[in-house]
Image (spheres, grey):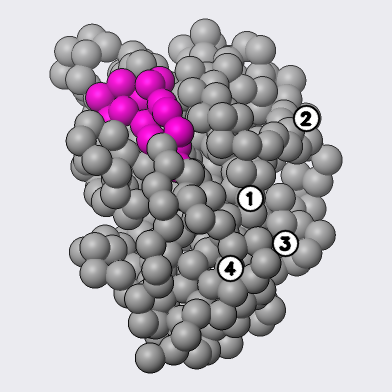
Amino acid sequence: MNLPRTVNRRAAVASTVWVKKTSLTETHIHEDRLPPLGDGEVRLRIESFSVTANNITYAVMGDMFGYWNFFPAEGDFGVVPMWGHAIVEESCAPDISVGERIYGYLPMGTHLDVLPGKISSGGFTDMAAHRQPMSPIYNQYARLNADPEHDPAKEDERMLFGPLFKTGFLIESMFRREGWFGAKNLIMTSASSKTAMGLASVAKDLSPNIKRIGLTSKSNVAFVEESGLYDETLAYDDVANLDQASSVSVDFAGNSALLHQIHSVLGEHLKYSCLVGATHVDARGISGGGGEISGPKPILFFAPDHAVASIQELGPKGFGEAVAKSWKSFLTAVDGVVAFDKRNGLNSAAHSFVETLEGRTDPQKGIIIHP
């Protein structure tokens, strides 16, 4: 059996933000004594993570897609997954060294114990039994010493934009594989959101003949226009002015009334309707908003499934290279567009989560938490 190797900052207690699943604004800090590590296990001390609309989606759709199952809590409470960086604080795995840093899927907390498997110089997979039924995409961790995506100067950008950008990348890949369903226009709601910006950037580079139309609130129109990622920007009040041309829509807002209006205005011109996430959680879904929705049935986009399809199409190496190239272009496009709002402590994390849930965040700022 491997004896634990430790660092001086070894903690006795793990703190985690617990969120009530049926009332997401209710949170509290839960503390547990850290147990001894089992053979082959590694303890990660979480250094930083971002709080974005992506995390709201994980909570809103936690039961539907099993997001609550990654970091189990108890009773009516759950732990919302985050993307961020951590350092190995203690190790019972011979191939994982104390002090090395990783990037990946983490709880909103201070620590995570993992059981590394499929270990390579660039990463490992958490083989903990309770995580195996979920998508393997979320169980993979990058080891920063040999991670081609890691840039020490862009760690904040990676946490804030990385997972959302990849979703945008996969949406564009899906549409391109399908010949954009014969459409000329790409319509995106919540155009100020980071996922929409990622999709717009990839479409601008890889599908330049597709017109990119961003829909947003009046207060965000200037910000969306200044990003330079869209050919046209419309406020939600002006949806009736959408081009009567063949289109596909991607709804990041989850606002039923808005989705119904887009379908109604475009009618037979709407060739495909895609649902991604839910930034307007008070009005999510496709029911209501005027009865039966017209046109194509909205299809929910589940990024891990499309990631598997893209990797099969391009091969792991080709997929990685394609993502890296588009990611570099996106970072150039958004350089200076979003400022970082850095906050300390798990109370700040909980407040930031609720603030994002309630739509009170500034799209020009990205929240980074140091627990």
Q: Is residue 217 left or right of residue 298?
A: right
Q: Is residue 131 left or right of residue 213?
A: left
Q: Nearer the viewer, residue 34 or 202?
A: 34
- Numbered badge on residue 48: 1
x then y, percent, for residue 353: 51, 29
**Residue to which mark 2 is pinned:** 226
Q: Residues within 10 Å of mark 1 (few under 14, many from 20)?
A: many
Magenta stretch: includes residue 291: no
Looking at the image, tell me whether mark 1 or mark 3 is earlier in sequence order. Answer: 1
Please tell me whether residue 31 is drawn above or below residue 103 in the rendered image.
above
Query: Which dot, 3 or 4, sits closer to the camera?
Result: 4
Real-space Cα separation, disc 4 to disc 2, in angstroms:
43 Å
Circle 1 — which element? strand
Real-space Cα separation, disc 4 to disc 1, in angstroms:
14 Å
Please tell me whether residue 99 is drawn above or below residue 40 in the rendered image.
above
Q: Nearer the viewer, residue 46 or 201?
A: 46
| Residue range highlighted in magenta | 16-29
Q: Nearer the viewer, residue 283 or 275?
A: 283
**Residue to which mark 4 is pinned:** 89
x then y, percent, for residue 238: 53, 11
Please tell me whether residue 32 is drawn above or below residue 236 in the rendered image.
below
